[in-house]
Image (cartoon, helix red, strand yellow):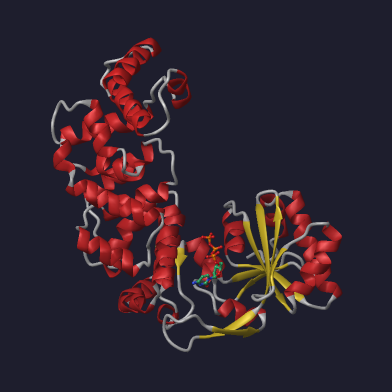
Amino acid sequence: MQDNVTDRIIKELPKPVVGLIQTAGRAAAKSGAAIYMVGGIVRDLLLGRQSKDIDIMVEGDALDIARSMSVILANKPIVHKRFGTATFKLNDYRVDLATCRSEIYDAPGSLPKVKPGTIEQDLFRRDFTVNAMAIRISQKRFGELIDLYGGRQDLENKLIRILHEKSFIDDATRIMRSVRYEQRLDFKLESKTARLLRRDLDMLDTISGDRLRHEVILWLSETQPAKILKRAARLGVLSKLHPALSWDPRLAKAFRDANRMSIDFPPVQLYLALLVYNLDKRQLGEFLERLNIKGGELDEVARQTVSLKIDQESLDYSPLQPSEIYQKLQCYKTAAIQANCLCTPSRDVRINLKLYLDKLRFVRTRLNGRELKAMGVLPGKKMGIILDRLLTARLDGEVKTKADEQRLALQLLRDL
Ligand code: CTP
């Protein structure tokens, strides 16, 4: 088996990035430190998959190396002194430098105690064999693959395997990560890993809301989140996040349809909305609390999704005046409406939601506030009422042209 992968590096990475990596190697050589690329980038290089995040670990002071590189490259890194890390940006690549470390877990789920270590210790603290390989990038032994746990063999056999029996106990986010890699790469959980995952499911209870939320967002940011959710449900992972979360063919269809929908916001919002659609308000509250989702966009979208579902009856008529649909929906986030449109069992509700999404939400009056002012309407409550009435008339097709709006505005001005 080939264990120098220089050709892979040159084939997969753009020249300037290879240059930066070589510069890191030279800078490390000068200070006598060993230096490596590690983790996801090694996995993806060997798989021939594109990856724009490059992790470099140094057996020595990473910031020292970053400083020398910065002078040679005339590229100033972002430095986090507290963590001893430096990040170089190069085109759309991101190169992180850190010091090799060893980790000790005091209690399951807690963040580990770390101290500087060797590359062997650094690889041993990692999640899966396929993520626990390194490539030397020092000048002399550039491209040498370090594979202490059979990661390359597992890549060939398409297996996700943990490094030791207590891996999921040390850090149960690995349970969620394993499903993500398995589905992203079209791999399988190695059988003992799958058994230990099932054994250690309860360890997810030791993980903080922030860390769980981070992993859920990573799931939903993948290109095929539905695959991950389906598998997570089957393994019992989803119901550990909340017992009422489940996967069924209807949800699968909603995810498929969502992929085809054109959306003008981050898809994670819509995917989360679909995931929580079947929950009731109490269950949703518990789920959001568990994931420490509060007060942001995701919180709002999730809550509005369930509120709108509960309120769907008011849209279950045909035909409804467009302005009535608009009134009912204008305060909802688009993702919440999309999710309801994808999941509702009612044809009439779906038609009304779709009309709003495709058309009504974009409708604007031709006259604006400035023009109304020129017509003698003073800014204030009256102007608000007139603009509302103009919009209603436009939504319902009562006015067609700007002149129609002007006539209606003058009439309203007289009547109000
Ligand atoms: N890692 C780990 N355990 C975790 C998180 C991360 O062992 N709970 C290690 C893995 O070796 C991983 C590396 O840290 O490869 C970097 O983490 P991350 O950026 O999350 O993973 P990538 O492998 O770069 O994955 P992705 O392709 O999803 O960015």
335 over 372 or under it: above or below: below
* Residue 383 visible in the snapshot: yes
Q: Nearer the viewer, residue 141 or 297?
A: 297
Left or right: 63 as drawn, with respect to 133: right
Q: Is residue 361 visible?
A: no
Residue 303 occupies which quadrant of the picture?
A: bottom left
Q: Position of residue 183 (x, y in %)?
A: 41, 57
Location of residue 166 (image quadrant) = bottom left
Q: Position of residue 73 (x, y in %)?
A: 83, 58
**Above or below for 406 versus 53:** above
Residue shown at 14%/28% (left/top)?
A: 318
Residue 64 lies left or right of residue 336; in this view the side is: right
Q: Which residue appears at 18% of the width and 49% of the height? A: 310
Q: Position of residue 363 (x, y in %)?
A: 36, 26
Q: Is residue 128 or residue 57 the one in the foreground?
A: 57
Where 395 falls versus 185 (above or below)? Answer: above
Residue 65 versus residue 287: which sits nearer the camera? 287
- How many numbered discs, if any? 0
Q: Residue 415 at what x, y percent from top left?
A: 26, 20
Residue extending farthest bottom: 106
- In front here: 226 or 140? 226
Residue under the point 69% across and 50% down: 11
Q: Quadrant of the N terminus?
A: bottom right
Quarter of the figure with the C terminus: top left
Measuring 42% from the left and 58% from the top, which residue is drawn there? 217
